[in-house]
Amino acid sequence: MTPVGHTIAGIWSGGLIKKSYTLKCLIVYTLIASLPDFDIIIGLILYGKKGLGIHQYYTHNFLFIFLAALLIYILTKDKRLTIFTVTVLIIHLFFDLIVTDERAPIGINPFYPFYNEFYNIPLLLGVKKGSLKELFSLNNFKAVLSEIIILSPLWIYSIIDYLKWRKGEKQGF
């Protein structure tokens, strides 16, 4: 799934669990929802273009979710933020499980390092990311558009919840 889909899921689940829509909260929701994809940046820095081969390997599994949630709890002592972290990272795994993946490794490796097998149920249009031309292709535009349409109940709910939140008491981290 693209960062657009992960961001929508992050804002929706963050608002649902934390009940706050401050700018700081929205940034935190987006960063945590996208956390498993930071392996792309690390891979590119360490290995160049070959680093894309580690994407979805070490950070798209239940051990990573546990460690990320534990770190969030140790740093913040915020139970709701920890619950949000677990929830949104499981959603991230699910979304990446059901998107069509054409570049190795195919799918996600949810039980790594205990069991080393990738799973993929290609239900949604995948993103092509082999070159800049592919990145800005019609296929990728369609993939983002389909995510926005499919996830429209989530972002519509988030907008309505945000408007209600603005009228009521504002909370934050």
Image (cartoon, helix red, strand yellow):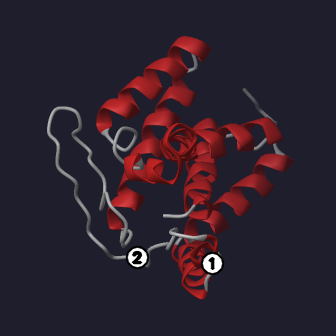
Secondary structure beneath disc 2? loop
Query: Splitting the image into 4 quarters, where does residue 27 fall?
Result: top right
Q: Nearer the viewer, residue 56 or 30?
A: 56
When the figure is inspected, residue 166 is found, relative to residue 64, above or below; the finding is below
Q: Which residue is mark 1?
A: 133
Secondary structure beneath disc 1? helix
When the figure is inspected, residue 162 is found, relative to residue 84, above or below; the finding is below
- The image's mark for residue 124 is 2
Of tags 2 and 1, the one toward the viewer is 1
Residue 66 is situated, as x and y percent measured from the top left of the image, at 37, 27
Position of 114 compared to 63: left or right? left
Position of 22 compared to 157: left or right? right
Mark 2 closeness class: few <14, some 14–19, many ≥20 residues within 10 Å: some
Residue that extends furthest to the left in the rendered view of this protein: 115
Position of 11 compared to 102: left or right? right
The residue depicted at 39 percent of the width and 52 percent of the height is 53
Q: Circles 2 and 1: CB distance less than 8 Å?
A: no
Query: Splitting the image into 4 quarters, where does residue 6 fall?
Result: bottom right
Mark 1 closeness class: few <14, some 14–19, many ≥20 residues within 10 Å: few
Residue 36 is situated, as x and y percent measured from the top left of the image, at 48, 43
Which sits earlier in the primary sequence, circle 2 or circle 1? Answer: 2
When the figure is inspected, residue 161 is found, relative to residue 66, above or below; the finding is below
Q: Nearer the viewer, residue 108 or 152?
A: 108
The residue depicted at 72 percent of the width and 26 percent of the height is 173
Q: Amino acid at mark 2?
A: Leu
